[in-house]
Image: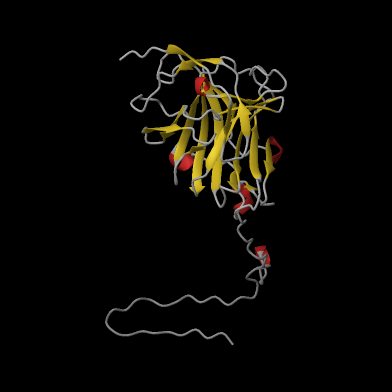
Amino acid sequence: MTRTSTKALAVVLGASIAISGVCTAFPAMEMEVSALDTTTQVTYPFATGENAFQYAPTFTMATEKASADRWEYVEVKFDGGAKDVRDAKYLAIQIRVDKGDPGLTVGLIENSDRFNNSTDGNKFYFLSENGSMKEMRSLYSAINLGAGACGTLLMPVSSMSWQWNNSQSDLSEVTAFYFTANAVYNFDYVLTIGDVGYYDGEPDAAATNFVKLVDCSEGEREKTMYYVDSANPDCMTMPSDSQTPAPEAPAIGYPFRTGEDAYVNAAEWGGFSVDGTKSNQQTVTVD
């Protein structure tokens, strides 16, 4: 079945107050309705099973509820610096929820401006490694992936909007993906973030290209490629951080002579012939 994109003019007026405590006003904008739905068959874009997340960092966020607004924040910088993603139709973020089920505001960073899922009611999708697709809607400027979720978050760019845009950013110099959550409402959760990329068309279309923005499939990236602001000082851990090297065997010197002199003056025992008609035992004693 061929899916087509339709256009609808969406005007969002006023301000929406999120659980996060952020008040944001959005200008009128034209939004293209995504053709993606939960029945769409999409080839999984990243590694799966044991090969998934093997070099990806894990983020253990604040473990206790904050008494006042406290934004836990993680930024994943793009390989090679700023990227022009104006042709992106869907963002794809490889993510695993190791603990909890936080409400996340997620998106892109350009000139410190934030392009994200902050418009309530807009649809986003989660593609599991087994190929199943789940639909989510933004609520209080956040989405919940679900406890134990493991797969790829698919974000239609048409469902995203500028929450902050003080520099007239236009997605031509995007430097990072980020997620954030208010620790008053979201705490004691753990996430692992792998690769990040985008589709320049519908994910199930043969002509669509997939572009990698963050690649940790071949090895760990430098820790400087991540920025973390968390109440937990040990928020980010790499797989290698938890690998304990095997203890080395102690060096023990060979206790006897070696080489040509190894058996000088040693006695030689020739044994005995086998005689099956009677017992024949011999004993060698070394004093």
The reply to whether residue 259 is visible in this rendering is yes
The answer to whether residue 166 is left or right of residue 194 is: right
Q: Residue at x 49, y 35 (%)?
A: 139
Residue 87, quarter of picture: top right
Residue 204, quarter of picture: top left
Q: Residue at x 36, y 24 (%)?
A: 40
Residue 35 pos. (x, y %): 40, 18
Quadrant (top left, top right, bottom left, bottom right) of the N terminus: top left
Closer to the camera, 146 or 33?
33
The colour scheme used to paint the residues is: secondary structure
Residue pushed farthest left?
A: 277
Quadrant (top left, top right, bottom left, bottom right) of the C terminus: bottom right
Q: Residue at x 56, y 25 (%)?
A: 212
The answer to whether residue 179 is left or right of residue 233 is: left
Closer to the camera, 19 or 80?
19
Q: On screen, 64 above or below 142? A: below
Closer to the camera, 154 or 10?
10
The answer to whether residue 238 is left or right of residue 283 is: right
Q: On screen, 232 above or below 208? A: below
Residue 181 pos. (x, y %): 59, 41
Residue 13, quarter of picture: top right
The reply to whether residue 46 is visible in this rendering is no
Residue 235 pos. (x, y %): 64, 49
- Number of numbered tags placed on the structure image: 0
Residue 23 pos. (x, y %): 62, 33
